[in-house]
Amino acid sequence: MNSSQPIYQLKQFLAKWLSYRRNLVGMAITIALGILFSAKIALTQQPVQLNVMMSALDAAQAQSVVQRFEEQNPNIQVNLIEGPNATNLVEDLYTSSFLLGDSPYDLIAMDVVWLPKFAAANWLIDLTDRIPEEELADFLPADLEGGRYEGRLYRLPYRTDAGMLYYRTDLLEAAGLEPPETFEDLLTASRTVQEAGGATWGYVWQGRQYEGLAAMFVEVLAGAGGFWINPDTLEVGLDQPEAIEAINFLRSTIGEGVSPPGVTTYQEEEARRLFQGGNSVFMRNWPYAFPLGNSEDSPIQGLFDIRPMVHAPGQTSAGAIGGWGLGISNTTAHPDEALEVVRFFASEEAQKLMALENGYLPTRESLYSDPDILAQYPYYSGLLEVVQNGVLRPPVAQYAQASDILQRYLSAALTGRTSPENAMQAAANETRTLLGRG
């Protein structure tokens, strides 16, 4: 046997093995590159994820709008994160997320009174130049203004709310009375119906020390021709004669027995239950009370109507604007996609869906004459006049503190712990100090 033969065979084996190994490595590299390429394609096909937090109830009711949006925009997925049902706690969670830095929320669902604080803190993207002016033409002016801060647009409103006067049509008709226009009309009509035994109380409203008190008072104050804070000049009007007139009207409802003594502890539901139970001629409340009052088990079904709030002679009605809108977080990595969500939520299509499904009031004027909405909610036609007379609570960055000041002193005046003049002078001075104008 040739001694070189085994060496030759060994070399042949090694050569084949090395070649095989190179092929394996090449194949592995090819497979790895293929996997990476496929993963890249898969990643680019994944929808953009956008997060927004709402109260648990609002998140549940927004599901159908999100579903409609995602059907039309398969490249964007909106994640509705359920927050507490108490809106002040939702605001606190949003605030904390921004203060901690790099908020996880791409979209911010905001109550109208949060907007000034959020915009002043630079937590929101300026939408002024991102939305064409013609796209804003259909919005109710007060609702659109509620999305602006210092003349810049940061929020599009997708539903509104406004304070209004509810009145018993049957009781006024029996007494030969027209719905009241002025403060004195309301007092006179209340006493007339009460004396005839038609109802125990004339007028119920929200007098408890909470945000609802500020909302209610801003209507009476504007109806008296006064103002709380001028957002342009930061002038404070709480110690002016019009503010005293507004408080005296509210105090007179209690002093004359038109309103129950306990009205200074009422929130919306206490007032609604008394009115819906047939025990009051008039009520100040939000639109949510209308379908409840007309439910099949309601004692006043079909026996009441709504109108703008009463006012002083020579002045005009005003209803406090509430409602919600969407803005874009300045920490989002996807501002363009977030803008598409904002525009869709505020669109005619989405607002009509929310109105039909949940009875929410649209922020677009055209929807108040929509035949499908009117077929389901005939009273919407009467709501347009109310929401057109909307008044904003002052859009200042320190709104929460200003509201707390007003609530404290207003409550003291309404419950007789101090005079309206002393209360409003103190409230005005404290508010001026807060705004740096003391």
Image: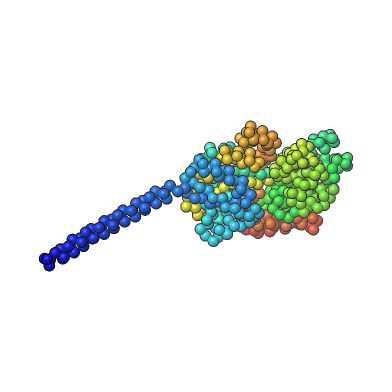
Say which of 310 and 111 sits in front: 111
* Displayed quadrant of residue 167: top right
Q: Residue at x 68, y 57 (%)?
A: 404
Quadrant where the image shows the N terminus = bottom left
Direction front: furthest residue: 1
Quick check: can you spot residue 360? no
Horizontal side of 157 relative to 38 (left or right) equals right
Instruction: Tell me what residue is drawn at x 61 percent, y 54 percent.
Output: 83
Q: Quadrant of the C terminus?
A: bottom right
Residue at x 61%, y 35% (from the top left corner): 366
Q: Is residue 356 visible?
A: yes
Instruction: Please provide percent x and percent y for residue 25.
Output: 29, 58
Return the x and y of residue 51 as percentages of the image width and height.
Answer: 53, 52
Give coordinates of residue 329: x percent, y percent. Answer: 53, 52
Q: Residue furthest bottom?
A: 3
- The quarter of the picture where residue 315 lies is top right
- Looking at the image, the residue that sits furthest to the right is 196
Task: Please give left or right for residue 262 compared with residue 97 in the image.
Answer: right
The residue positioned 70% from the left and 44% from the top of the image is: 288
Toward the viewer: 40 or 242?
Answer: 40
Residue 431 % position (x, y): 67, 57
